[in-house]
Amino acid sequence: MKGFNQIVAIAKREQKRMLQRGIYTFCMVLAPIVAFLFFTTLMGEGLPSELPAGVVDEDNTVTTREVIRNLDSFQQTNIIEHYSDVAAARKAMQQGKIYAFYYIPKGTTQLAISGKQPTVSFYTAASYLIPGSLEYRDMKMMSEYASGAVGRATLYAKGYTEDQAMAVLQPIKMEMHAINNPSLNYSVYLSNTILPGIIMLLIMQVSIYSIYVEMKEETAKEWLAMADNDIVKALIGKLLPQIVTWSLMGLFCLFLLYGVWRFPLNSGIWPMVLNMFLLINASLALGVFFCGLVPSLRWALSLATLWGVLSFPISGFSFPMMAFPDTLKGLSWLFPLRHYFLIYVDQALNGLPLHYSWLNIAIMLAFWGLPIMLLGRLRKFLLEFHYTH
């Protein structure tokens, strides 16, 4: 009972310190809410639309004008300008006015009618990954449609029926089905990993600051004395108000993702609540671990920031893990966000039973083994080391 009372007293002390310092309110409430709203509304429509593009039509025939109108009708592409030559279109793309342009050389229609093989070109700004990729897809699709239309007209002229012509043009009919994200909503895979990643990064930084500020203000001995110099009870009391606050922010994040935006949630909400709770606790464990690793606020925050930033690419949500070097594949097991992402894929997207994610859940729990190894070292830092920036 004495230990429980000590933990409660330390938790009340920590809660009071959090309310008296604006940095806690900013990092634990304001910054996450702004990030949640920003990222979820940034791609509220799922995909960027009406991306500016240009066209260079040196042929200027009824056929090429129809091709351009069809291209402009695509949701992602908006033809905003007709350029006189390739040099002018290229300059506009370099200036950032357009993300791509479509080039139809003179004589294209005549070559197509005569049965020869004309060439059209399209140029995209690969430095802008998403808009460049989307407009590349539209222009490539438009070229295939135009080629098919010319081929179909030629076959009709030779007396082919529509079924016969389509059998020649498309001997194998293909269907595409996007599993778990049929609308190809970019926000589904971006927001569901970026937002928990931001929470993880802030948790590590706030937990490190809350521990080292005791050293800076020379209150570490007072803090430990409230727990009879038991570092475990001292840490539990200090981190308890943070766990409660971060849990509320995590639930708010899940509410936005699955309650407001209705992102895929095939397993129900409770596995994702568990997933978020595991991420919060693993992030706190890493924060304590970095504190026990180096007796410096600056170095501990730098390590946490580096770990947090590396978590985004190494989680595998944007670049497939199978394409990573073997060394990085092994290191990915040390990042909580990687396991959060895998649990999210299994539960929210694929709707698998929870036991399929047992390994990732176990590893998330195992992160608390890291600070346990350094508790004695951290206690020594707090009692003996003077604060350094």
Image: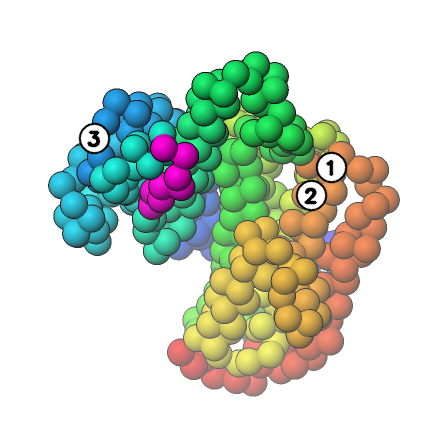
Give the position of the C terminus as an image quadrant.
Answer: bottom left
Q: Nearer the viewer, residue 94 or 389?
A: 94
32 lies left or right of 338: left
Q: What label does residue 345 carry, if any?
A: 2
Query: Which span of residues is magenta-colored?
Result: 114-122
* Disc 1 secondary structure class: loop
Q: Marks 3 and 2, how far apart in space?
A: 49 Å
Which label lies toward us, 1 or 3? 3
Dominant SS of magenta comes to loop
Farthest residue, direction right: 355
Q: CA distance from mark 1 to mark 3?
A: 50 Å
Residue 115 on the magenta segment? yes
Q: Label 2 is placed on what type of residue?
A: Val
Let me know if residue 56 appears in the view: yes
Left or right of residue 254: residue 97: left
Q: Does residue 301 show up magenta in the picture?
A: no
Mark drawn on residue 60: 3
Q: Which residue is mark 1?
A: 350
Residue drawn at 68 percent across, 36 percent down: 349
Do we see residue 234 in this rendering?
Answer: no
